[in-house]
Amino acid sequence: MTSGIRLEDGGRAAEGRLRLETSRPPTDRWTERRGWFAVEYDPVRIGSIDGTDTTPHDKALVRAQRARFDPARDPQIQGDPYATLFVARLHFDTTAETLTSFFATYGPVRRLRLVRDKTTQKSKGYAFVEFERERDFEQAYYHAHRQVIDGATILVDFERSRVMEGWKPRRLGGGLGGHKESGQLRFGGRERPFKPPLTQ
């Protein structure tokens, strides 16, 4: 099996705690997809549909390889990483209050950060939601994904920066997912899991 990749088996992590893609990554119950999930971040492999590439195919991947990212140096990144969700594809007019109200239906929200442009203060379309209890985080992970808020179908995933070894965010050429139009798709995540190797 390719280094840094685990075959998704539909099970939950030991003791019901969703420790990011350990030996048994969480099942995507909404799409029923069975694929491959990255357990550590390798920019070159993340850029290929089956996780087997050994050379980068776009300039952003080269940039991600060279980039250094330390979430501990960002004062905005706080709280328990194992109780924090990454929420993306938000409508740009969605407010922090709306998000807090939505996610509070799964349990008490300790902290919510709607990421904004430093210059314009406009929403960048993604947020981080920290729950007081991990069981509520787990419920939101499974059930909030692909729900609609303000007309936008949202993506809900783990906050990976502190729990995924080698993580590089999209602004550094990394990330996961993406749109075909961008030409910078990243595989191994919830929306775009790896496919079985094309060649054996």
Image: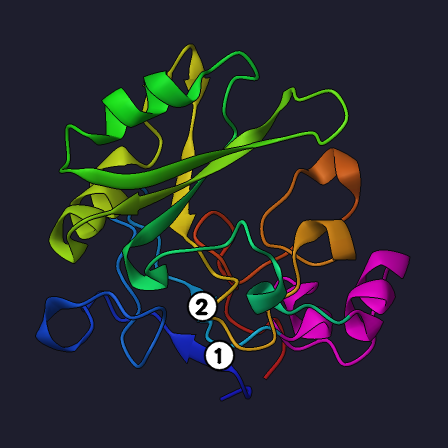
Task: Identify which residue is drawn at 30% across, 62% down.
Answer: 82
Q: Which residues are magenta?
A: 42-67
Q: Could you tell me residue 115's position as x and y percent?
A: 56, 34
Q: Are marks 2 and 1 in contact (CB under 8 Å)?
A: yes
User: Does the magenta-highlighted stretch encompass residue 153?
Assistant: no
Q: Residue at label 2?
A: 36
Separation (CA) of disc 2 from disc 1: 7 Å
For residue 145, which numbered disc appears in the image? none
User: Does the magenta-highlighted stretch encompass residue 64?
Assistant: yes
Nearer to me, 184 or 107: 107
Looking at the image, the residue that sits furthest to the left is 15
Nearer to me, 135 or 120: 120
SS under mark 2: strand
Q: What crowding class fits label 2: few (fewer than 14 Cα within 10 Å), some (14-19), or many (20 or more)?
A: many
Residue 143 vertical placement versus 2 (above, below): above
Q: Is residue 86 left or right of residue 122?
A: left
The colour scheme used to paint the residues is rainbow
Sequence-wise, the earlier of marks 2 and 1 is 1
Amino acid under disc 1: Ile
Task: Identify which residue is drawn at 59% across, 73% down.
Answer: 41
Q: Could you tell me residue 151's position as x and y percent?
A: 43, 10
Nearer to me, 13 or 99: 99
Q: Is residue 136 visible?
A: yes
